[in-house]
Amino acid sequence: MSNLAIDGGAPVRSAPLPYGRQTIDEEDIAAVTEALRSDFLTTGPRIESFERAFGEVVSAPFAVAVSNGTAALHCAMHALRIGPGDEVIVPTVTFVASANCVLYQGARPVLVDVQPQTLLIDPAEVERKITRHTKAIIAVDFAGQPCDYEALRAIAQQHGIGLVADACHATGAALDGRAVGTLADLSVFSFHPVKHVTSGEGGMITTADAEAAMRMRRFRHHGMSRPQGAPAWSYEVADLGNNYRLTDFQSALGEQQLRHLSKWVTRRQQIAETYDQALLARPELTVLEKRPGVHHAYHLYVVRLRPEALRVDRDQVLAALRAEGILATLHYPPVHLQPLYRNKVGTHLGQCPVAEEATRWIFSLPIFPTMTNADQGDVLTALDKVLAAYRR
Ligand SMILES: *Cc1c(COP(=O)(O)O)cnc(C)c1O
């Protein structure tokens, strides 16, 4: 008989521990309040101020703030002039938004497999999938670890195509001393509350390309622009745009949060290090590999069960952990197996074998800066309890 909470036993925690959550302090609240009392709720000075601050943090010449990370991805597709007939290569282990942005532009997402040890896009797979229709690659810094941008940039250059970093997991990360935000033609960030810094909802694109930045600024604002010298009340619409604007009070929150970024990334790294040490010797699971030269931002801490060591599947382990009060979860079911992609894009089972196998066994443990050592102790206690009960 097990004493697992899922079987009626006492849970490790009575207050559930989420896998991620925001940190808001009085200064954040004051910054938002000040914005609310100002003349501008939107399209005011705080947006530019946030953009400047973010651009400085990642050493990028241009930063364009938008309403969320998904809008940021869409802006990136517009900046690269992705359209019908084009193909864009996207890894299948990612949040579905990474691929949906290609569909928004009427283009074709080509979903490719990942490397087994990191779940990052496999440059060799990218090479294999390039055709004369390929216009861009979207690399995803899964869990907060930058991809192999050296290899990806070489491929992009050789074929004359765009390289986008979906860096929504990787704010504050770096590779060989270069900040994420400068490693691709366009880098996309999200400020959703589970991400490293939040503006409630929000997103940003960084680039060194002035024209791309201008195209994205127009795209977030209905495609509107004012020709030089034209009167203040006039505008011109050359491209179809959207309303993807971030508000001033969100920008105030985002800029305020940015001050904590490096400290919060350090705390995430500490938590990851403790998990690494504690899980090293566990025969029931492995952890993802960290590539050399990586300053990891640890949006997620992902573990992978070893099926040969267990009597149950991943979903049973997740359900049992959650019953113990540890809200571990799955990132992500592979995009190519979603009905939308099977039906609209023609993807199929067997297309990305590494991802298909890995995503049967992975899950994410709680990690966020204000998680205490005691919280992490609860995670490890619950994991021990569950794995002991289900060990083969
Ligand atoms: C969070 C996230 C997005 C979307 O960001 P939103 O701000 O939620 O729209 C896109 N891609 C990845 C990999 C993400 O994690």
Image (cartoon, rainbow, N blue to C red):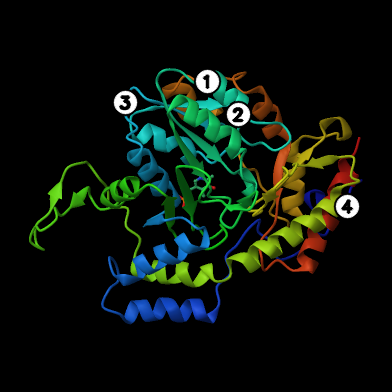
- x then y, percent, for residue 121: 60, 33
Q: Nearer the viewer, residue 387 or 27?
A: 27
In-image side of 3 versus 126 (left or right): right
Residue 21 can be seen in this image: yes
Q: Earlier in the sequence, mark 2 or mark 3?
A: 3
Whether residues under marks 2 and 3 lie with C-beta atoms below 8 angstroms apart, the answer is: no
Q: Secondary structure at mark 1?
A: helix
Q: Nearer the viewer, residue 167 or 242?
A: 167
Residue that badge 1 annotates: 129
* 138 lies above or below 275: above
Q: Quadrant of residue 122?
A: top right
- Tag 3: residue type? Pro
Give the numbered dot on residue 88: none
Give the Cα separation between the discs numbered 3 and 1: 18 Å
Give the Cα separation between the discs numbered 1 and 2: 10 Å
Mark closer to the observer (3, 1): 1
Mark closer to the observer (1, 4): 1
Q: Secondary structure at mark 4?
A: loop
- Tag 1: residue type? Lys
Q: Quadrant of residue 11?
A: bottom right
Q: Earlier in the sequence, mark 2 or mark 4?
A: 4
Q: Earlier in the sequence, mark 4 or mark 3?
A: 4
Whether residues under marks 3 and 1 lie with C-beta atoms below 8 angstroms apart, the answer is: no
Q: Earlier in the sequence, mark 3 or mark 1?
A: 3
- x then y, percent, for residue 243: 28, 52
Residue that badge 3 annotates: 84
- Tag 2: residue type? Pro
| Residue count near mark 2 (Cα–Cα under 10 Å), binned few <14, some 14–19, many ≥20 | many
| Residue count near mark 3 (Cα–Cα under 10 Å), binned few <14, some 14–19, many ≥20 | few
Give the Cα separation between the discs numbered 1 and 4: 50 Å
Residue that badge 4 annotates: 3
Q: Earlier in the sequence, mark 1 or mark 2?
A: 2
